[in-house]
Structures are given as C-alpha cells and as structure tokens.
Image (cartoon, rainbow, N blue to C red):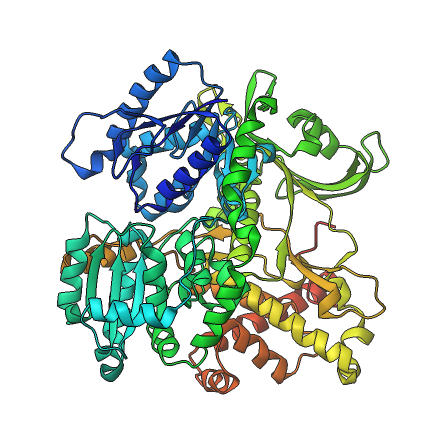
Amino acid sequence: MKIAFCLFKYSPYSGLSLDFRRILDECRKRSHDTHVFVSEWRGERPEGVQITVLEPPKISFKFSNHAQNERFHNKLQVELKKHAFDAVVGFNKMPGLDLYYGADSCYVGDKVPQYPAIYKLTRRYKGRYSFEEAVFGMKSETLILSLSARQKSDYQEHYFTPDDRFHLLPPTLDERFSPVADRVTQRAKLRVELDLPIDDLLLMFIGSGFRTKGLDRVITALASLPIALQERTSLIIVGDDDDEKQYRKQADRLSVSPQVCFLGGRSRQEIPKLLAAGDLMVHPAHNENTGTVLLEAIAAGLPVLATDVCGYADHITAAEAGIVLDSPFDQETLNKQLASMLTSPDRSRWSANGQHYGKNPALYKMPARAVDAIETYENRKASAINNIADGKTIHDVYLREDLGHLNFDELLDIGKSTPGGRHNVVQARVVGKEGRRTVSFSHNGQRYYLKIHDGVGWKEIGKNLTSLRLPVLGAENEWKGVHHLRRQTLLQNLGLNTLNIAGYGTRERRFWKILNNPAKRQSLIVTDEIPEAISLEDLFKDKLFWGRNANKIPIKICFKRWLIEQLAQTARVLHNSGANHRDFYLSHFLLQRTKESHERTPENSSLFLIDLHRMQIHKPRWTAWIKAILQGVLKLQRPHPPESVTPRRWKMRDVSGLHYSSMDLGLTKRDLIRFISTYENISNRQVLEALQDNDGFWRDVQSRAQNLYRSEKRRTRKTGKVANTPLTPASTQH
C-alpha cells in the first residue's frame, strides 16, 4: 500500500510522535510505501522514508497556532492531489483523512467548557472545531483509531459518531522498551551524575507539555512536604517545553529551586535509565488522553502517583503499582498522598507488582493492530444517515448499527403505537404535562425502550422559568447525561452502570422557517432494555426483604450495606464531577440480577441509574474565572481554567430526595452514618462530628426530606389516595 502520514509537528520527546514512529516502523516492516508530511521535524530523520516538510509562514503570536495548522492543511491538500495514496493517516485532526490516530482529547468536550461562552466567537474556536468535526462528524467517513472507551464516549456525546467508525487499539509500549535490570546501580549512578546524596529521594516527572501534565501541581506538592522530608527529596523534570521559565519562577517563589532539576528532553534510550533511578513517578495531569509514560514507569518498577483523568490510569490500579487520585482534583490531597507514598513501606511492593504487570505481551501490540486497521481500510464501507422529512432537516441523528435501517419518522411512529401493534410495542407510558411518551418495543429479537419528547409548549416553559427551574426541552439532557456518567464510571472504575444508548435524534421546528421554536422541538432517545431488573422502589415494597427482621439474616445484612454504599458512591461521583440528577429517588435506580441465584448478593447484582432527562452538568462560575485569573496574575503565570463544581443547593436537592424516598424503609441511624461516610469519604467518627453541627449540610438535607415527606402525606390525604410509600414523585421508565 501507498500510505501518507500527516502530523503538524514531530518531536522525539512527544508521546504522539513516538506512537507515530512505532506505526511507521511497523508499516516499513511490512514493505508499505510510506510518505510523511509535517510542518516541522525535530531530531534525526529515519532512513528510507520520504519526509516532506511543508513550512507555513512564520507567525510570532502563540495564539495563532491554529492559523499555522490551517495553512499547513491547505498545502497538504495540494501535495496529496499529486499522488494517488491508498490511505491518508493523520495524527492530528484535520479534514480529508481516511484514518485518524486518536491521541488527542475532545476539544469541544474538554477544552471549550474551560473558557467563557464568548470564546465560541473567536477564530481559534471556529478553526479547531471545524477540524475536529471533519474527523468525527456524522458526514465524515474517517476511521478513528481510538485508544480508550472513555475517548469514544466523549466524542460521541458531541458529534454522534457512529460506532462502526471506531477501532479500539490496545495500550501501547514500545517493543524495544526494556527496563533496567540493576535498578540499585542505576539509582546510585544518577545521584552521582546530579551531585545528590545517595539516600535522597527522587521524584520523576517525564513528558512534554508541562501545563497539561500538571507540573505546577507537582512543584506545589514538593513545597508542601515536611521540612525534613523536603530537604532530602529532589524533583527531576524530563521534557521539552517552551514555558520552562515559568515553572523555574514558581520553584523560586516557593523556595524549592535547589530541589528542582530540569534535564530537558532526553532520548528514548535514556528514559529506562531515568525510570530505574527514581523513587516515585508523579503525574497529576489536568487532562491526558492516554499517558504512555505511566505504562513505562509501571513496567520499569517505578511506583506512580497520578490523577484519574489519565487514559491509562486504570492500569495503575490494575497493576497495584501506585495511587490514582479521584476527580475533582484537590491540591491538599495530592500533598498528603505524596508525603505518604515517599515514606510508605509499600513502595517495594508497588515496584514488584509493576514489573510483573509490564511483562504482559498485550501491552506491546498496538502498532501491529494499528497497521492491521490501515491495511483493511479499503474494505470498510462507512455510511452517514441524513434524513429529510416534510421539508424539515433532521439534525443530530445517531442510530446504532442494529437500528441503522430505521429513521426518525419510523421511530416516532413506533412511539405513537399501542401495545400489541405491528411494531411489537410491549408497554407504553405517557407523561402528558411534559410532552413525553415512553414505549417498550421489540426489534429483530431485541428489546428496547424508546422515549419521545414531543415539545413541552410555551406554557410549561414559562411555568418552569417562573419557579426558577430549567425546562426539559428534549432528550439532549439524557444523551449528555448518559455519556457523562459513563465517563465518570470508567474514570472511577465503579460498579455503577447506566443506560446503553442505541439511538438519538432531534428535529427542530421553526418560526417562519427562520427562528428555532424550542417549545415544539421533537426529540427521541432509544436505549437497550435492562433484563432481569427491578426498581429499588418495587424491591423495597417487599417488607420481608427489607424489614427490620430481615436485617438479622447475614446475607441480607451484607447486601443492604453494599447497596447503601453503592447509592452513596453514585451520589459522590455524580456531584464531584460537576453534575446533579434532579430526580434522585429510589425509583430511578434499577437492580439487575446478573446470575441465577435464590438470594440477591453484591456478587450477582448490578445497579443502574436511569431517567437522566433532567440531569444538569454545570460549568465553572464567572466568580471562579475571576479568581483563577487573579491567581495567575499574582503567580506570574497563565491561569488554569477552574473546574466545574456542583452547587451546594443541587447536592442537597439530590441527597434529600434520596433520603425522602427511603423514609418508610425503617433505616437505622447506623445505615445513615454508613451512607454519609461513603458520600463524604470520611470516617464514622468524622460523620458524628458533622451531624452535631446544627447548621451543617446534613441537617439541611434532613429538614428538606422531612418537608417533602409531610407535603406528600398532606397531598395523599387531600386526594383520598392511599400511598404505601412516599415514592410517588417519580416512576421508572419500565
């Protein structure tokens, strides 16, 4: 095959460039004709490879990188037309690619929310968005070589990219990577080279892009160490970055510059020696799609301290080779963990576990799998679904392969059908006031749930706005909520699950064919049925299962504790990620029995959080932006965008709703303490101290839950309807 490789810049110290070289070398092994197009090449050029450097005009301003990339792409298109390539493979996002190696994070999902709304009016945003849409948009036919399931979910949330265009690659280590056998000798050698005492502890920070990988966090953590520990701890920084001067100033300001050593970029042959000489790898990245250096550190026997936003952070947990910090990031937590790991006797165990994990052959097969995908590219047929109905354009339609031959109107027809009709509708439920209809239907032997939003009307919108609530205008909230929760589940390695989306679509109705009418917007979402599942509301109606007498049975005691911890963990992860549910009741949790068993146990059960159509995902407040800018000015460095935070009132609304829906279950004080302990991630003693605070969060939660409970009882007496439980505000989609 005649293959063209395209990337903006090549640097021997960049992880993306190293992956490119591995794939390039694998192609050369298989005798493919390879051509490389770059705007800048640093380092030695491989022999036998035709490299074309398309230098764009020099622009002095850093913020104009996007303009340079656009000029490079224009020149690239001219060069590609001169040759008949069988496949064009890109390592950066740009139009006209046949395959894209997905090493970068989602720009719209990760970067854009960190800036004020006015940022979308800039040329920088429009340029980068157009390049990303050209790769991941529904009209594109580019095959994506994805490196993680979390990355796939992120792009699908914003671009509705079909499943069949993603090709998941395994984690990657260079097959030539060989850990140093004699770590003791290498450790002593590096200390002599750097003129450090033999007993000094070495923190290793490796990677270009200091800002993204969190070097500022590492320097701050080093400065926070106890004086005795700080004096015998040094930080070795390996990497090439234009902002190195900024971090030198930070070290001077925090009085730790004698302990900080910048080694600059180093060759790949030197990296194993540096890893062998260190005592701890610190990688608290702000955002990292993969993080190959984490795998290299693990394989080299170097314990790792990293954040969970790194794509390969789960390998640290799987190998038991270090500590992964949960989101949202807290500097104080990093400071404490760093001091703890430096003095922990577990370092030798982490090192041995990592070395054992690094011998797994599956960690070295990424280049071969990538080239396999390139070779089979010509046999792949991609198709985009563009539906036109009644002169109205259907926007943002996503249908999984098993529903691919259906369209928007056919799904609407299914949603309006009655049970037992020609569409195999099993069950239907209508929520008239909010314009929603949910049906259960069967298609090709598989069961699905279809939720249709027909438009809430201006009356309902006005009612919500006057009561200071955001109206639910369609299925978009649920689409984004499912993807958000799934990413958090992958990050935290939780046993929590949510809906599996099979289809999503929206149709806008317009005023005078110009203006969008949000009150008449039609949308739908299709999800897989969750078999053998029961809502917690229905489960707890069985007093024999949950009553006080049942608590004496050991199996049920264990299951009860597991369930309470799962509910608390779900709430914690949801709120820490900057989101809230708004309908956080027991009725919106499904418990699935995964194995045939007489008793329900944690081992044979899975918990699902459903009905996310009212879910809110918060963006940083303007006050947080001002604070971040002021801190950046005071520290003489670029400000870091603030992280999303769920407001206290929304946390309280969710937790109090959950507490209210469980008030008839006979929960004990010990059960409540267990929930609070898991939610706050604190000890039982700290929980008791928190409950003694009459003005605290949990007092407000209890007060709101009791008010909801009394209101429901009054409403029951007024209507004359007898309610067995206070779970009437919500019911499951089942």
User: Residue at image x 34%, y 16%?
Assistant: 79
The front one of 594 and 589 is 594
Residue drawn at the location 61% of the way across and 67% of the way down: 567
Query: Which quarter of the figure has residue 475?
Result: top right
Q: Measured along the vertical axis of the image, is residue 618 above or below residue 459?
A: below
Above or below, 460 relative to 652: above
| Residue at the limit of the structure toward the top, as seen here | 82
Residue for point 51% across, 49% down: 364
Residue 46 location (% of width, % of height): 33, 34
Decide if residue 619 is in sight here.
yes
- Percent position of residue 83, x then y: 40, 14
For residue 107, side relative to residue 370 (left or right): left
Position of residue 574 relative to residue 421, above or below, is below
Residue at left 56%, top 19%? 392
- State the image coordinates of residue 84 (x, y, percent, origin top left): 44, 14
Q: Position of residue 182 (x, y in %)?
A: 39, 68
Q: How many marks?
A: 0
Q: Is residue 191 above or below residue 27?
A: below
Between residue 238 and residue 437, name the one nearer to us. 238
Rendering quarter of residue 238: bottom left
Q: Nearer the viewer, residue 430 or 15?
A: 15
Q: Quadrant of residue 443?
A: top right
State whether residue 581 appears in this view.
no
